[in-house]
Image: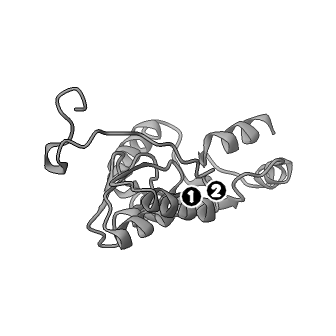
Amino acid sequence: INAAGGIKSLGGAQIEFVEYDTQSKVDVAQSQAEKAIAEGAIAIIGNSASAASLATTTVAERAQIPIMVSGGSADQITQRGYKYTFKINPTIALSYANTKAYLENFFSGDVKLKRLVHVHEDGAFGQSVNNNSYAALAKDLGFELVAVPFKTGSADMSGLISQLRRESGEALVFTGYVPDAITFVNA
């Protein structure tokens, strides 16, 4: 776009990408979005954490700046009626059909799904997956759902693992961010 003369509707303005680290923290994400807008941003792209995305989309909406959420999955990111918020990845509600088909296929033989343990981070992402996907699947497919939230960013999940050893089920699913998944698997 820059080589072709820039953004024509903005008088040939050149695109410049400026990086702001939100650290996937709500307060930092909000202040970084405010800083970017104060420094002249005309659009925002990013956020992998749903809670951070909720904060930055509110800031962008107030400033009437388009924001493209590239990773946040919580359904409420796009369900608040904001005109300037867009998402690349599907919402949790849209992934429901795929998860349902997977569970129906996986548990179609001798092993029936009676109880599913859902380990999820306690923020907007994990709550959205639990409440808008697995809870509905439990109702539709007739299994019991055991929701086990954990604090995202936990350095030690040995207590969580001890709790899970007391739960029984045919399947366990995990919803969290990559660092949490690594800590979980290591524990």
Q: Where does residue 59 sit, x and y in percent of width and height?
A: 44, 68
Q: Which amino acid does label 1 sit on?
A: Gly
Which residue is pictured at 37% across the width and 73% down the height?
A: 62
- Does the rendering let one see residue 98? yes
Q: Mark 2 points at which residue?
A: 121
Q: Looking at the rendering, in which quadrant would you find the N terminus?
A: top left
Q: Where does residue 169 sit, x and y in percent of width and height?
A: 65, 50
Q: Which amino acid does label 2 sit on?
A: Glu
Q: How far apart are marks 2 and 1 (CA)?
A: 5 Å
Of the image marks 2 and 1, the number of the one nearer the N terminus: 2
Marks 2 & 1, CB-CB < 8 Å contact: yes
Q: Where does residue 164 sit, x and y in percent of width and height?
A: 76, 52
- Quadrant position of residue 77: bottom left
* Element carrying mark 1: helix
Residue farthest to the left, as pictured: 8
Q: Where does residue 114 sit, x and y in percent of width and height?
A: 55, 54
User: Which of 58 and 108 lies nearest the eye of the viewer?
Assistant: 58
Residue 14, placed above or below residue 100: above
Answer with left or right where residue 175 lies relative to residue 86.
Answer: right
User: Which of 25 and 155 lies nearest the eye of the viewer?
Assistant: 25
Which residue is pictured at 73% across the width and 55% down the height?
A: 167
Which residue is pictured at 19% across the width and 50% down the height?
A: 10
Residue farthest to the top, as pictured: 3
Q: Mark 1 points at which residue?
A: 126
* Element carrying mark 2: strand
Answer with left or right where residue 69 lies relative to residue 122.
Answer: left
